[in-house]
Amino acid sequence: MMNQIVQGVLLGGYYALIACGLSFMFSIMRIINLAHGSLAVVAAYLIFVLSERIHLPLWLCLILAVTAMSIVGWLLQLFILDRSARAGQLLPILSTFGLSMVLDNALFEQFGADTRSLANSIGDLSWDSWELPGGLFVGKLPVLIFLTAVALLATLQLLLSRTAIGRAIRATAEDPDTAGLVGIDARRVNAMAAAIALSTVTIAGMFLAMRATFEPYSGAQQLLFAFEATIIGGVGSLWGTLAGGIILGIAQTMGASLHPLGFLIAGHAVFLAILLARLFLPDLATLPARFMKRGVSA
């Protein structure tokens, strides 16, 4: 039992990492980015090409990929999301859905159906582990992913609460028209927020390539896990995203211990249960986010 819980918590770190960009974009721009998973796979392929074919150090690959994907996020917001948002709430969703199809098929056309991985680039880190008291083993890579998720969420939280850019982002998210009256350019702020979100997506894409194999159509599954973690933890809550990822991860590992198909079934069941709770018992449904916020404050 304890082993499943520990592994579920670590798995939840990855889900929080893949979900934080989705949650961040929705909380700022009220846009559900259905291309989120595909963009993570694009980042994974970009890092793979830089590492395996151009033979750059992995840290340099990440820096270059984050820079490139940030520019993509900026342009995506200015030329697609911002324009489509003027036509109503549905068009941005359709636009990102169409973008995901274009990206998936473009990756398939370029790289084929073969699976890829960055396991060769990280050596022993892909499989090595530590032994804890009680005979528990925790992988070094899952621990690194979990710590990265916590550090990234903490950085985003500090950015929003302690910097001028963060205050501008929060003001724009609250009321873009009023923010414009005090000199804040809502289009520019939203573009910066999209660039930040795509930076987090790039980091998630790198860890996706490290921890598992990926192929051009892996984005849909990553989007599903990110969406479930976001809904479970509370839409727009960064620390709630971590709580949602942990809850989803524990549910999946516990389900897998009961039945081979229980990994996905248990996760979906918890997601549906909390979704219904949000509809009929809103105070109870916000407990994960409130618990994480109280724990961080303490």
Image (tube, rainbow, N blue to C red):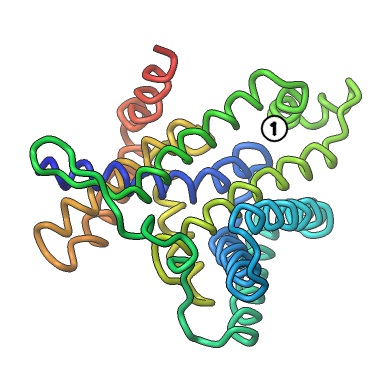
- With 37 as the anchor, is 109 left or right in this view? right
Q: Which residue sits at x=48%, y=59%?
A: 223
Which residue occupies the foreground of this view, 46 or 15? 46
Q: Residues within 10 Å of mark 1 (few under 14, many from 20)?
A: many
Q: What residue does disc 1 label? A: 173
Q: Which residue sits at x=52%, y=43%?
A: 20
Three-letter residue code for mark 1: Ala
Q: Disc count in the image?
A: 1
Q: Quadrant of the N terminus?
A: top left
Q: Which residue sits at x=64%, y=20%?
A: 161
Q: Is residue 243 above or below residue 26?
A: above
Which residue occupies the foreground of this view, 199 or 294? 199
Residue 153 visible in rendering: yes
Q: State which quadrant residue 108 falls in.
A: bottom right
- Residue 257 location in percent, x, y? 12, 57
Q: Residue furthest top?
A: 298
Label 1 element class: helix
- Residue 178 location in percent, x, y? 82, 24
- Residue 78 location in percent, x, y? 83, 52
- Residue 187 location in percent, x, y? 84, 42
- With 211 as the anchor, is 223 left or right in this view? right
Q: Which residue sits at x=22%, y=41%?
A: 6
- With 230 as the anchor, is 104 left or right in this view? right
Q: Is residue 9 above or below residue 65?
A: above
Which residue occupies the foreground of this view, 221 or 85? 221
Residue 81 visible in rendering: no
Which residue occupies the foreground of this view, 34 or 217? 217
Q: Is residue 110 above or below residue 190?
A: below
Q: State which quadrant residue 44 falls in.
A: bottom right
Q: Quadrant of the C terminus?
A: top left
